[in-house]
Each structure stands twice: as C-alpha cells, then as structure tokens.
C-alpha cells in the first residue's frame, strides 16, 4: 500500500504564461517553489498534500505526483523500467486505468504506442503480483498515470486530478468560444480584485470571469464544486482524510463580499446561461445580471475593476466589424468608469489600439494557442488620449 504521507516531487501543470500566478497560489498555500517551467511549477509534498492542491488551486490544470524517473532509449527499455515499479502499491487491480503521455523520442513514430507500452507494463506487473488486472482506456474515471518521455529521459507520474482542474463542473451552458475557467481565474488574480470593491463585467458571455471572481472574493476553493478526482482511485486513499480536508477547506470561505459584481451581455441567451452557471457554482446571489449593450452596463460608485473579454477576430468576429466595438470600449471606460481600473483581455493588439487609452500594464496569457494580453488602464477624468502608435502594442512586449 502506498504511503500517502511520504514526501515526493509534485509537478503542477498549467497554461503557458500562467506559472507566475500558479506559483503565487502555491506559496499562499505554504508550498515551496522548486522551479517554474514554461507550463507548470514543480513543488514538493506528499500524496495527502495533493488533496489540498486539487481543491484549492485556481490556475492549475493537473497535479502530478512523481513515481519514478529514469532513462530509456526505446520502448522495450521503457517497458522494463516501468514494469519493475511496485504498481500494486498505487493502482487497484480491480479499478480502471487511464494512461496519458507526452512523448518526443526518436524511436517512436506514434506517441500512442508509448502510452500503450506504459499501460502494458503496469497491468502486466499487477497481473503478476495480484493475479488480476484493471480495465483500461481513455476515460479518466479511475486511476490515471501520466508518462513524460523526451529523448532518453522519462518520468512517470500519478495524475491525482483525473480530469483537468479547469473542468470545475459549473459551466453547464458554455456559450460561444468561452474562456476556460483556469484562464479566467488567472486573469482575475492578475487584476488583484478581492471583493472589497466592485467588479463590472460587460460582454460577460457565459459568465466565467464573474463566477471565478465571485469564487476568489469568497475565498471558496474551486475544487469543492467537483466530486471526482484521480487520487480517490489510488491504493491507500482514505475517505475520512478527504472529508477532513474538504471540511477544513470549506471553513476558510467567506459568506459575503463588500463590493458588487455586475455582469451584462446584449444576448439574452448568454445572460440566461450565465445565471444558470452561477447558480450551479453557488454564487448566483452575488452577481447582478442584466441584458443590455455594454455601453448601458451599470457602474456603481465606489470604484473597483471593469473587465472586458471582447471578440478579437481569431474565432468569432470579423476584425473590421470589431473596430467600432473596441473604440466604444475605450469611450465607455473613459466616460463612465472614472475611479475604476479598466481591463481588456484580447488576442488582437491591432484592435486594442482602437481603444485609444494608454495601458499601464500588458500581461501575457494564452487562450489555448492564441497569445493574448490583459491590458490594464488607469481611468481618470480629462480629455481622451489619441490612439497609440502602431509600435506600442506588440505581442513581444
């Protein structure tokens, strides 16, 4: 039986450009930062720690606990190394096994073959040791193993998350081109909004930004919305410990917030979807929804953050048609939102120039493979500045 309290290496994966925010989350939870990677952060802890990480992390995709790392030149050597590991201490022989992989080895033409060899090595070991073997397939409903193999170096992990942590479970109606939950959480963390003042989200779409903002303001762990994780299918998992971790995590949440959250959209179907998603997430009582053009969005006194996630021509909108919208966003921020911090999330910085305001920060993010920026504007009374010169907003800045 695996020792859930034995310390080891933990790799927490995330989107590109997200490690800075993920590392901040890990530090806040008391975990050391061993190193930041392009799309992940390495820390240390035990399998019991992964329960708390899966519950609390907002920007993470997966929490991977390392079992072993070694060297393998080809698939046969990989099989032998993995087959020698004590999988009977980790994987129940009567459960379901899923193997995912990231492979770049010159001897492998089809990465699925490496995953198959890894799966065979595990189930053959379990059959030899226990006389039984788990069912296997692509469905991550049981134990999940992750193989990383680059060149001759490989590492094998227990995927304690199972399904990606971005799948909170509340977004039953996604809408058109929705922002992934983990991306929305990272964007909200970057704004620094904590619930002490107001949050205005025009063009709210499926409501993901407003919902993630509400969860942050309440200090409510996003993993509490889920009922299934990969660690629940590992040998040695203790349901009583899990319930204690969940209870302790729930106790850190707040009941209410000081500021208002207002989410609007011109599309009635989007507003209806946002309401339903907020209801599923348990934060519908905190968000005021309205169906209106973004220019008519209520802006209460008291300041706070105004955040837009407009179309940027990559997937949905025609860039020429969007020019007037970006210009209108600039006017709305300048004329209606004095005393607020303004934010526009976009993957089209040519269109962003039409906002006509000078950004004070340009934070990089990735929406899937699209390189984006979160632009921050200081909003103050006075004449509207002219559009920025073409060389001021480059994706490389």
Image (tube, grey):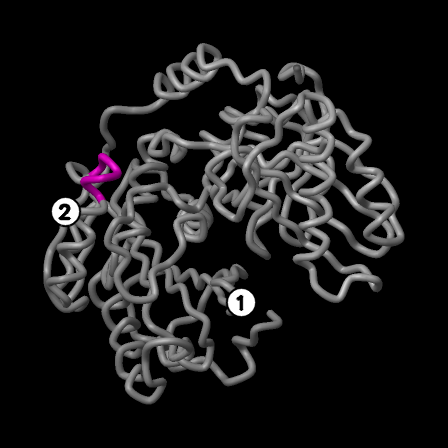
Mark linked to residue 213: none
Q: Judge from the rendering whether residue 209 lies leftward or rightward of residue 2; answer left or right.
A: left
Q: Check disc 2 and report its element: helix, strand or loop.
A: strand
Is 159 within the magenta?
no
Residue numbers of the magenta segment: 278-283
Q: Judge from the rendering whether residue 244 lies leftward or rightward of residue 236; answer left or right.
A: left
Residue located at (24% from left, 24% from top):
255
Q: Classify 10 Å Cα crowding around label 2: few (below 14), some (14-19), many (20 and above).
A: some
- 32 lies above or below 74: above
What separation in Å lies between label 2 and label 1 (alpha carbons)?
A: 32 Å
Q: Quadrant of the C terminus?
A: bottom right
Q: Position of residue 310 (x, y in %)?
A: 32, 69
Q: Position of residue 40 (x, y in %)?
A: 63, 46
Q: Check disc 1 and report its element: helix, strand or loop.
A: loop
Which residue is the site of mark 1? 369
Q: Judge from the rendering whether residue 74 lies leftward or rightward of residue 350; answer left or right.
A: right
The residue lying toward the viewer, choosing from 99 and 204, is 99
Which residue is the site of mark 2? 288
Q: Judge from the rendering whether residue 10 lies leftward or rightward of residue 208; answer left or right.
A: right
Residue located at (52% from left, 45% from top):
61
**Secondary structure character of the magenta stretch overall:** helix
Is 281 within the magenta?
yes
Residue located at (72% from left, 22% from top):
129
- 118 lies above or below 133: below
Q: Quadrant of the N terminus?
A: top right
Of circles 2 and 1, the one toward us is 1
Q: Position of residue 130 (x, y in %)?
A: 67, 21
Give the mark, 2 or 1, whose residue is nearer the N terminus.
2
Q: Which quadrant holds residue 218? A: top left
Residue located at (25% from left, 76% from top):
328
Q: Classify 10 Å Cα crowding around label 1: few (below 14), some (14-19), many (20 and above).
A: few
């Amino acid at each position: 039986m695996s020792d859930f309290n034995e310390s080891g290496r933990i790799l927490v994966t995330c989107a590109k450009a997200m490690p800075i925010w993920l590392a901040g989350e890990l530090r806040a939870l008391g975990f050391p930062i061993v190193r930041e990677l392009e799309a992940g952060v390495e820390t240390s802890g035990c399998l019991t720690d992964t329960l708390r990480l899966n519950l609390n992390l907002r920007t993470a995709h997966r929490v991977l606990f390392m079992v072993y790392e070694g060297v393998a030149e080809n698939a046969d050597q990989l099989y032998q190394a993995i087959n020698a590991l004590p999988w009977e201490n980790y994987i129940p022989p009567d459960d379901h096994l899923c193997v995912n992989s990231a492979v770049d080895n010159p001897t492998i033409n089809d990465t699925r073959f490496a995953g198959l060899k890894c799966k065979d090595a595990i189930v053959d070991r379990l059959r030899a040791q226990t006389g039984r073997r788990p069912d296997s397939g692509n469905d991550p409903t049981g134990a999940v193993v992750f193989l990383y193999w680059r060149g001759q170096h490989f590492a094998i992990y227990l995927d304690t998350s199972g399904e990606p942590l971005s799948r909170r479970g509340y977004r039953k109606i996604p809408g058109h081109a929705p922002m992934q939950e983990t991306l929305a959480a990272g964007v909200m963390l970057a704004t620094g909004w904590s619930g002490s003042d107001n949050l205005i989200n025009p063009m709210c779409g499926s409501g993901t930004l407003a919902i993630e903002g509400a969860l942050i303001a309440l200090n409510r762990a996003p993993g509490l919305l889920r009922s299934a994780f990969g660690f629940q299918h590992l040998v040695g998992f203790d349901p009583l410990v899990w319930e204690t971790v969940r209870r302790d995590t729930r106790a850190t949440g707040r009941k209410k917030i000081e500021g208002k959250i207002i989410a609007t959209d011109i599309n009635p179907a989007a507003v209806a979807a946002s309401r339903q998603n907020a209801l599923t997430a348990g934060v519908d009582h905190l968000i005021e929804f309205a169906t209106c053009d973004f220019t008519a969005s209520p802006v209460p006194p008291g300041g706070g953050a105004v955040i837009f996630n407009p179309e940027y021509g990559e997937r949905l909108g025609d860039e020429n048609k969007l020019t007037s919208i970006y210009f209108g966003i600039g006017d709305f921020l300048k004329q209606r939102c004095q005393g607020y911090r303004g934010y526009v999330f976009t993957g089209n910085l040519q269109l962003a120039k039409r906002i006509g305001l000078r950004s004070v920060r340009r934070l990089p993010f990735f929406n899937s493979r699209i390189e984006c920026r979160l632009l921050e504007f200081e909003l103050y009374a006075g004449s509207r500045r002219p559009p920025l010169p073409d060389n001021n907003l480059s994706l490389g800045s």
